[in-house]
């Protein structure tokens, strides 16, 4: 390994995972080698902890994890060591704006730590809940006990979500990004994968030039820009590719593993 890389952060869906949402044997082999040679491997995802933990276990990853797009960082296990939720007043204002969009078949999912609440049992909710076997799942916003959400996720038609995003931005200070054409994500202002990675690197005493970050979507931009080596996937959004230093092969072609093998001369 000929470069002084100390930490690699990667998004999961559309980046490290293939199109079947699995870790390929090749990508696992590369990450195993790097971890065994002292490189910190950080999984950084929009998913809640329970939605990513099977990948962490598959890699036998004992490191920190960034979840819910940077709102939460966990220790080597499940303990939250960094938790930056939306404040209640802001969340309530966003929910008030959302009421106008419900008639356009826009669904709301909210995450409060490990608790996951969907406005109704939509297609995405059923598919995700069944696949990930999440424990604390509730249908119906009446199940909300605390409005200090880690993340709010709106699901629906892209054009309508763009209008919703504009109205939210004009009304409250929050961080918004698309993680998928149909997914609009709302976080506390100033919170994203990049700020979470910066916090983690400071804790570990790692300089940004010793970091590689991989991503494919808008919610990965700040993380890619923070890293000394920012890598977008070939299948990624055009804006993400423009902001990155390098472009890797697509997620279904072992893009992450092959980039690391070539870049680090493994």
Image: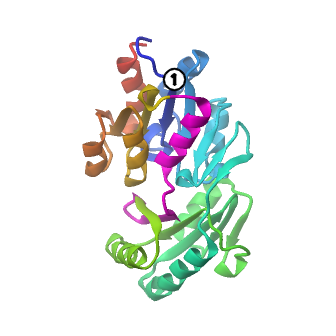
Q: Is residue 50 above or below residue 138?
A: above
The reply to whether residue 24 is in sight is no
Instruction: Find out whether residue 235 is within the magenta segment.
Output: no
Residue 49 appears in the picture as rendered: yes
Q: Position of residue 15 (x, y in %)?
A: 43, 41
Residue assigned mark 1: 6
In this picture the colour scheme is rainbow
What segment carries the magenta color? 179-206
Which quadrant of the rendered structure holds the C terminus?
top left
Residue at 49 percent across and 53 percent down: it is 192
The quarter of the picture where residue 83 lies is: bottom right
| 40, above or below 199, in the image | above
Q: From this view, report whether residue 218 is shown above or below residue 264.
A: below
Front one among 195 and 183? 195
User: In this figure, what is the number of numbered marks?
Assistant: 1
Q: From the viewer's side, name the closer residue of 66 and 259.
A: 66
Q: Position of residue 210 (x, y in %)?
A: 45, 25
Tell me the quarter of the image containing the N terminus.
top left
Of residue 94 and residue 162, the one placed in the foreground of this image is 94
Q: Quadrant of residue 63?
A: top right
The residue under the point 41% across, 48% down is: 222
**Mark 1 crowdedness (10 Å alpha carbons): few <14, some 14-19, many ≥20:** many
Residue 143 is left or right of residue 39, and the answer is: right
Q: Residue at x 62, y 67 (%)?
A: 149
In magenta segment, residue 186: yes
SS of the residue at dot 1?
A: loop
């Amino acid at each position: 390994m000929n470069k002084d890389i100390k930490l690699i952060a990667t998004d999961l869906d559309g980046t490290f995972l293939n199109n079947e949402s699995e870790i390929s044997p090749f990508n696992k082999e590369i990450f195993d080698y790097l971890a065994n040679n002292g490189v910190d491997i950080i999984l950084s995802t929009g998913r809640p902890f329970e939605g990513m933990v099977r990948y962490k276990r598959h890699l036998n990853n004992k490191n920190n994890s960034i979840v819910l797009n940077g709102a939460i960082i966990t220790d080597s296990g499940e303990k939250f060591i960094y938790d930056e939720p939306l404040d209640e007043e802001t969340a309530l204002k966003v929910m008030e704006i959302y009421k106008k969009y419900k008639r356009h078949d826009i669904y709301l999912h909210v995450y409060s730590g490990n608790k996951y609440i969907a406005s109704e049992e939509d297609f995405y909710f059923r598919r995700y809940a069944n696949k990930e076997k999440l424990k604390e799942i509730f249908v119906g916003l009446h199940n909300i006990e605390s409005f200090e959400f880690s993340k709010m996720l709106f699901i629906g038609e892209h054009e309508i979500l763009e209008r919703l995003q504009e109205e939210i931005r004009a009304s409250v200070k929050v961080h918004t990004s698309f993680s998928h054409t149909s997914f609009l994500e709302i976080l506390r202002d100033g919170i994203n994968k990049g700020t979470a990675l910066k916090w983690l690197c400071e804790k570990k005493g790692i300089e940004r030039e010793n970091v590689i970050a991989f991503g494919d979507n808008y919610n990965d931009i700040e993380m890619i820009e923070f890293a000394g080596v920012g890598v977008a996937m070939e299948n990624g959004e055009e804006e993400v590719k423009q902001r990155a230093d390098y472009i890797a092969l697509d997620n279904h072609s072992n893009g992450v593993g092959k980039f690391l093998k070539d870049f680090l001369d493994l």
